[in-house]
Image: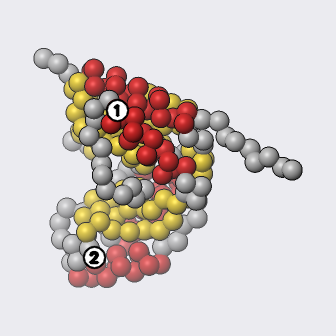
Amino acid sequence: MQSVTRTFIALDLDESLRRALASVMRQMAEQLPAIRWVDPAGIHLTLAFLGDLTDERLREAMQAAEAAAPQVAPFACHLSHLGLFDSLLHPRVIWMGVHEPSGNLQQLHRVLNQELEQRGFTVERRPFSPHLTLARIKAPLKPEERERLQRLLLETKVAASSKVGQLCVMKSELLRSGARYTHLGDYVLGEEHEEETP
């Protein structure tokens, strides 16, 4: 039987961002202990989720990442603000927004999608909203928990940034202990173009 690999393409985070996120999650977990927080070591910025791929399709996904990476220069990402998927009444995911002022992150997402489409992959059509998942909420929150969450969303401030220099093809394995992620291929972004001084 042909093996399949649950695959996505993402940007990995450096240690300074992971530490900043871990600190935010620790503070929030003290107030909201019933919520299931993700492991900071596994947090990454997903650009394309491709699902279960055969070995042949996995090679094509890696070719797409390899072709896309040199077309975009490295850039800095900044953690911006906390947010929710769905509503405060029925929150499903707590996330940290990512701000990237140069436009290179959006360009990398666009170029990667083009390379994937050329190889027959279906890509996400919704506008790209870069974010990092911090928690998944399975059960409805009690009214007092919703109040604490709302206060934390408003009050939590974080200032951290990191340089992004490579695109990663990753394997995801869903284990009883949680998800495990493995790098299958890392592709260096293109050259930085220094501004010429007159």
- Residue shown at the point (38%, 50%) measured from the top left: 39
Residue 103 in percent (x, y) is at 55, 54
Check disc 2 and report its element: helix, strand or loop. loop
Q: Amino acid at mark 1?
A: Gln
Residue positioned 41% across, 74% down in the render: 153
Residue at numbered disc 1: 118
**Left/right of residue 19 with respect to residue 110 in the rendered view:** right
| Pick the front one: 148 or 105 | 105
| Cα gap from disc 1 to disc 2, whole angstroms | 39 Å
Residue at image point 25% right, 69% down: 86
Q: What type is the residue that disc 2 sits on?
A: Leu
- The answer to whether residue 74 of the structure is visible from this angle is yes
User: Where is the N terminus found, in terms of image quarters?
Assistant: top left
Q: Between 118 and 74, which is closer to the camera in this rendering? A: 118
Whether the residues at callouts 1 and 2 have beta carbons within 8 Å, the answer is no
Number of the label disc, if any, that sits on residue 100? none
Sort mark 2 into few (<14), some (14-19) or many (20+) by Cα contacts within 10 Å: some
> Which of label 1 and label 2 is nearer to you?
1
Quadrant assignment, res 117: top left
Helix, strand or loop under label 1:
helix
Q: Residue 85, how many percent across, how many down?
A: 29, 66
Relative image position of residue 193 (x, y in whole percent): 69, 42
Establish if 90 lies above or below 13: below
User: Which residue position holds label 2?
Assistant: 88
**How many numbered circles does the render carry?**
2
Q: Earlier in the sequence, mark 1 or mark 2?
A: 2
Give residue 61's position: percent from left, percent from top.
Answer: 35, 29
Residue 47 in which image quadrant: top left
Q: Is residue 152 above or below residue 162?
A: below
